[in-house]
Amino acid sequence: MSIRNKNVFITGPTEGIGKATALALAQDGANLHLLCRNPSKAEALRGHQSASGHIRPGQGHQ
């Protein structure tokens, strides 16, 4: 099954397992929607070379 062009929502994507998962899925062509509390960390992840163009940071609510 291909993940290319599928929408994937990830919580906690800026560190640890969530970050590794986000980068791997982006590299495989998934369209990621990041749900996180720190928008600046999401933007830093978006700038990662392997994820470029596939990540759409969102802002969570506390």
Image: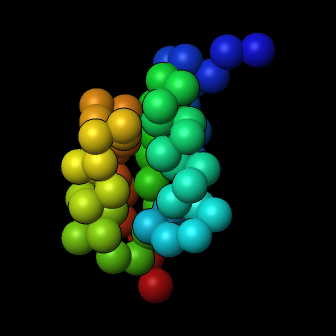
Residue at image location 33% in from the left, 56% down from the top: 45
Q: Is residue 31 left or right of residue 41?
A: right
Residue extending farthest to the right is 1
Residue 44 or residue 62, whichever sits in front: 44
Give 60 or 16, whichever is nearer the viewer.
16
* Vertical position of residue 8 compared to residue 22: above or below: above
Q: Which picture quadrant has residue 61?
A: bottom left
Q: Residue at x 48, y 23 (%)?
A: 29
> In the image, is 39 to the left or to the right of 24?
left
Residue under the image location 28 percent in, 40 percent down: 49
Q: Is residue 3 above or below residue 35?
A: above
Relative image position of residue 15 (x, y in whole percent): 50, 71
Q: Is residue 6 visible?
A: yes
Query: Residue at the spot x=33%, y=76% of the render?
Result: 38
Q: Position of residue 60 (x, y in %)?
A: 43, 70
Residue 3, quarter of picture? top right
Establish if 46 lies above or below 51: below
**For the image shown, how many numbered marks are present on the structure?**
0
Tell me if residue 12 can be seen: no
- Give the image location of residue 19, x and y in percent: 51, 59
Give the side of residue 6 with respect to residue 33, left or right: right
Q: Estimate the x, y position of residue 36 in percent, counting from the top left.
A: 44, 68
- Looking at the image, the residue that sits furthest to the bottom is 62
- Tell me the quarter of the picture where residue 6 sits: top right
